[in-house]
Amino acid sequence: MMKKSKSFIIFLFLIASLGIMACQTEREQAAVKEVLFFTDEIEPVIEVEAEPFNLKQVRLLEGPFKEAMERDARYLKGLEPDRLLHNFRVNAGLPSAAEPLGGWEKPDVELRGHTVGHFLSACALMYASTGDEELKTKADRIVVELAKCQNALGPSGYLSAFPEEFIDRVEARERVWAPYYTLHKILAGLLDMYIHCGNGQALDVAGKMAACVKMRSDRLDQEHMQRMLDKTEQGGMNDVLSNLYAATGKTEYFELARRFDQKSYTEPLANYRDELKGLHVNSFIPNMIGTAREFELTGDPVLHRIATFFWDQVIRARSYATGGTSNDEAWRTEPYKMASELGPYSHESCCTYNMLKLTRHLFSWSADCRYADYYERALINGILPTQNPEDGMMMYYVPMASGLFKTFMTPRNSFWCCTGTGIENHAKYGDSIYFHHDDSLYVNLFLASELTWGEKGVRIRQETKFPEHEKTSLFLNVNRPVELALYIRIPYWVGKQGYVEINGLKLETYSSPGSFLRLERKWKNGDRIDVYLPMKLHLHPMPDDPNLAAIMYGPLVLAGQLGAVELPREEVYGKYGPTADPAAVPYLSPPSDELDSWIKPVDGEPLTFRTEGAGNPEDVILVPFYKLFGQRYAIYWEFRQDSE
Ligand SMILES: [Zn+2]
């Protein structure tokens, strides 16, 4: 795993060639490569099994994901730069007449400024995903203004929307809300502007900020640094500083990144001990992403073990059917104790955003199908359902308690953690559909899209109405016949009658659920592959209570419709989660263990089911969670027989 391979270096050279083809400026050439883990500045020390494609190489085609992306773009275009910048300007002593934004961007909220970082990331991702110049230009201008604020704040490189005194407080262990969490978001936004938009000024501003962080960190001994990080929401300082190192080759950034590793948290994980109880979830996962990134840059097997064991524990022992995790911001129980964790504030959506990022790294190292299976489940049940198709507003908590309903942000007064990750979520659906390695191409997600793999002279168009249709079709457009191994994900949930056709001819072979089907041949222009992915009903029980389970159809969490939400708008908008009482929820007494015998499809309504003779006091209609809006719902059902 740690040896340098010649083919890998040649492979990187090919990526470099691709960058030159795809981009206009020298800065862009450098930036494009960084997103693929390494740059010319540093030598790779691990071999990966599957490289992600650059977001610029993938375009979404019509479907629910593209629609969500377009709603997100409209929201981003509507946000006023002067309002976003207000607190930065005030903090730097520069004039600002703008009306401050609300939520955690209010001028007296200590976390102010985090949204600007997310906004830069979202615009950069959206530009990479769509080529939309309007958002790039808007974000470029914000970088110019941030640079002015940084200059006005003095020579140290400090840049934020709050005074530097907040950092004094965190160093002194005095009460303050998470200044490093916010600095991480701003640094990440600037770096995304460099990576995806070739904005060199953004890299300069980020470098100066990092110099300031280094100056402060250098004054603290290791023990003090660890004390400062203990129970502090620092987010992914180790991640963003590692990325800054990868982008520049400056080892001081990487040394600084390592100082933000929290030893008291990582040592148990390195020894296969889950001591996650009590930790703050949405700031801890980014630190694990940083650990994954540090593994990529060092090859240290301990870091590999920490990141993979952590992932396993969160997915196996601490997640809901939706792929979400956390309850009221934290992990509150010992592992595998989830039945008590169904509340109005369970499954915080920014945690899913971060788990997907971590999963992307882990899939790259191993090309293990279970990472891709999780990615799909969390994307379709934990990300897509969190944006309201009516108005593009997004969710904070995703209530797992039955009888509740979805609540949403408001356009200008709800700038929370999940609002920030939310605007990024819907800008990067193209991110993990396809991966590649040497002459191999991985198709991980069944999502209507077109991939341009210029280096191979290959274009692949994936046409699908998945999940409404239980199949996907791949059309190859190649300059000349090309030897390629296509790896098609055969998901863990697939039913027995799955098969594949190449140019209309059914193949003898398929693959076991939860693995990749390898199709290797010399592909010709116009070749077509149809993949049939029959779904089946299955249960996703709680690990500590087999009588408490979610109902799934293929990768889809089905939610029971419990009646339209008859609540004032104030109950639904501007709330982290619902505060109204839950409605009464039927329990299920199935007449048979065969789910098909009592969960029946509703004619003419795709992916809609009705229980028959199982609901008490009445049966329920089940629809995919991503389609359920304006209703109270239940995801987890109590299963019991009347005699019990
Ligand atoms: Zn959040």
Image (cartoon, rainbow, N blue to C red):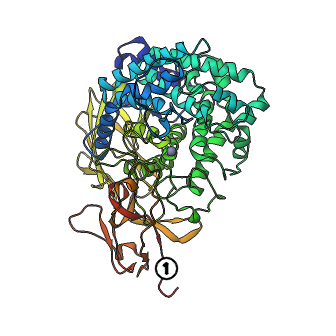
Where in the figure is residue 32, as x and y percent of width and height? 43, 22
Q: In which quarter of the image is the N terminus?
A: top right
Where in the figure is residue 315, as x and y percent of width and height? 55, 52
Where in the figure is residue 52, as x and y percent of width and height? 45, 33
Q: Three-letter amino acid code at disc 1? A: Arg
Q: How packed is label 1: few (under 14 Cα within 10 Å), some, or many (20 or more)?
A: some
Q: Is residue 303 visible?
A: yes
| Image vertical order of residue 422 relative to residue 19, above or below | below
Q: Residue at x 27, y 45 (%)?
A: 63
| Image vertical order of residue 604 relative to residue 108, above or below | below
Q: SS class of the residue under badge 1?
A: loop
Q: Nearer the viewer, residue 588 or 110?
A: 110
Where in the figure is residue 278, as x and y percent of width and height? 66, 51
Numbered circles on residues, count? 1
Q: Is residue 35 visible?
A: no
Q: Name the residue under label 1.
A: 640
| Image vertical order of residue 148 relative to residue 189, above or below | above
Q: Which residue is drawn at 29% across and 30% down?
A: 481
Q: Is residue 148 left or right of residue 1?
A: left
Q: Which of 395 and 154 is in front in this view?
A: 154
Q: Nearer the viewer, residue 368 or 374?
A: 374
| Image vertical order of residue 110 relative to residue 564, above or below | above
Q: Which of 267 and 457 is in front in this view?
A: 267
Give the farthest residue toward the left: 604
Q: In this view, does 612 lie to the left or right of 185?
A: left
Q: In this view, does 572 lie to the left or right of 219?
A: left
Q: Quick check: is the Cβ at mark 1 less than 8 Å away from ligand 1?
A: no
Q: In which quarter of the image is residue 624?
A: bottom left
Q: Residue at x 48, y 35 (%)?
A: 105
